[in-house]
Image: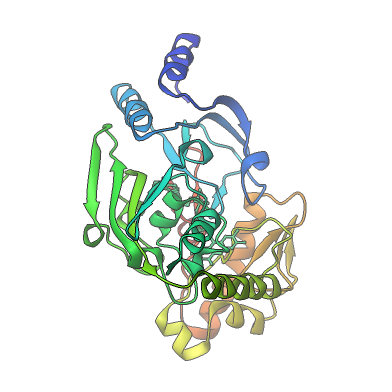
């Protein structure tokens, strides 16, 4: 990272009211428990602070990136040499009026799902087991049970690379299967306006409990992972089934490289058994992708995103 002086650190602390941390071990804070050291992690508490941080970096020509709860990212073993803005608990206000929900990007998704249920709003049941932030969910257009958050979005507030606040309607967000414009436009999502329909609290609760029980049965939730490593696609699904089933049939369950292992419970999960390196995970992913291609003719695309030491966030399949 370009040298950050003590004076710079004082300025950043003046802008950012949350944590401003140097030399953070990413294997301590990342969900996969993998990664080298991050030079600088900043945790702003408002859109205004995000905008001021981005302006500060822009004026100095400093690359930086955004992360949420890190449940879908793989950090490089070499660490992260540029500043990282982490949107999380200190930026998580939420209000509800007439079925319209206005939430900060740091809202924890299972908490959002529960709040919707308590307010008698249906449509967020499928989110109850997704362990990330709302900002990460919007960027990934996450969801489950054939649903995605994009279907509930009215508008998204973000901050562009120069520090200007942008407001986009749902149709301008480019929502597609596990994708959105925020994967490529270098904007940081800061708040989201969503609509959910009235429902019966007890029925919503039953749906959520069913979903959570299903996840406990199907997914290896005790070991660190990033959830499903590879995306499904209509083609492979129609011809061969979901990626997990295809990978399982090829005999990958239980395959290990270093500390990383294809989960014996679900073949589309790669778990960290203790001391996995990013290189171990990438080696397994490459073996799986090559074998699936040889068998089916489909090239799997990663849902997991790889963070380079220079702060680029790419689909992990693009670095295999
Ligand atoms: C056990 C487990 C189960 C999972 N199940 C599901 C599931 O059922 N469905 C599903 O869709 N996903 C699932 N996931 C994946 C993951 O939880 C989601 O993709 C989640 O939405 C990512 O949120 P995050 O805050 O952790 O984002 P991160 O992992 O921190 O970041 C993911 C991407 O979003 C970007 N990003 C993060 N915050 C922002 C922001 N504020 N503005 C702009 N970009 C941002 C990052 O740069 C990165 O590119 C699962 C993961 C695990 C570990």
In the rendered image of this protein, does residue 135 appear above or below residue 223? above
* Extreme-top residue of the structure: 7
Left or right position of 154 against 201? left
Corner quadrant of residue 50: top left
Choose between 136 and 199: the one closer to the eye.
199
Residue at image location 49% in from the left, 50% down from the top: 133
* Extreme-bottom residue of the structure: 239
What is the basis of the colouring in this image?
rainbow
Residue at image location 42% in from the left, 14% down from the top: 11
Percent x, y for residue 4?
Answer: 47, 17
Left or right position of 85 against 129? left
Choose between 54 and 117: the one closer to the eye.
117
Corner quadrant of residue 139: bottom left
In the rendered image of this protein, does residue 231 appear above or below residue 306? below
Percent x, y for residue 45?
Answer: 44, 32
Residue at image location 68% in from the left, 49% down from the top: 277
Choose between 320 and 260: the one closer to the eye.
260
Percent x, y for residue 183?
Answer: 36, 53
Residue at image location 70% in from the left, 75% down from the top: 217
Corner quadrant of residue 220: bottom right
Percent x, y for residue 293?
Answer: 51, 78
In the rendered image of this protein, does residue 13 appear above or below residue 98? above
How many circles with numbers are drawn on the protein?
0
* Extreme-right residue of the structure: 274
Choose between 305 and 165: the one closer to the eye.
165
């Amino acid at each position: 990272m370009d040298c950050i002086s003590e004076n710079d650190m004082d300025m950043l602390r003046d802008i950012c009211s949350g944590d401003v941390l140097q030399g953070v071990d990413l294997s301590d804070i990342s969900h996969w428990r993998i990664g080298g050291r991050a030079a600088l992690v900043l945790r702003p508490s408002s859109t205004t602070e995000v905008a001021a941080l981005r302006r500060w970096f822009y004026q100095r020509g400093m690359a930086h990136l955004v992360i949420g709860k890190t449940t879908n990212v793989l950090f490089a073993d070499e660490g992260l040499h540029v500043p990282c803005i982490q949107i999380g608990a200190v930026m998580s206000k939420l209000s509800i009026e007439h079925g319209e929900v206005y939430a900060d990007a740091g809202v924890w998704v299972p908490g959002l799902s529960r709040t919707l249920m308590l307010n008698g709003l249906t449509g967020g049941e499928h989110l109850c087991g997704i362990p990330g932030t709302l900002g990460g969910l919007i960027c990934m257009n996450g969801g489950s049970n054939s649903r995605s958050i994009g279907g509930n979005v009215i508008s998204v507030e973000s901050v562009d690379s120069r520090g200007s606040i942008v407001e986009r309607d749902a149709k301008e967000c480019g929502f597609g299967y596990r994708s959105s414009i925020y994967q490529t436009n270098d904007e940081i999502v800061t708040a989201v306006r969503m609509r959910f329909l009235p429902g019966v609290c007890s029925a919503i609760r039953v749906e959520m409990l069913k979903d959570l029980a299903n996840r406990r049965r199907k997914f290896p939730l005790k070991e660190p992972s990033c959830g499903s490593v590879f995306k499904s696609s209509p083609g492979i699904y129609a011809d061969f089934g979901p990626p997990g089933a295809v990978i399982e049939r090829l005999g990958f369950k239980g395959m290990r490289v270093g500390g990383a292992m294809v989960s014996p419970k679900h073949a589309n999960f790669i778990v960290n058994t203790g001391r996995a390196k990013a290189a171990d995970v990438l080696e397994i992913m490459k073996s799986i992708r090559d074998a699936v291609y040889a068998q089916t003719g489909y090239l799997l695309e990663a849902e997991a995103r790889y963070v380079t030491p220079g702060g680029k966030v790419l689909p992990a399949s693009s670095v295999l």
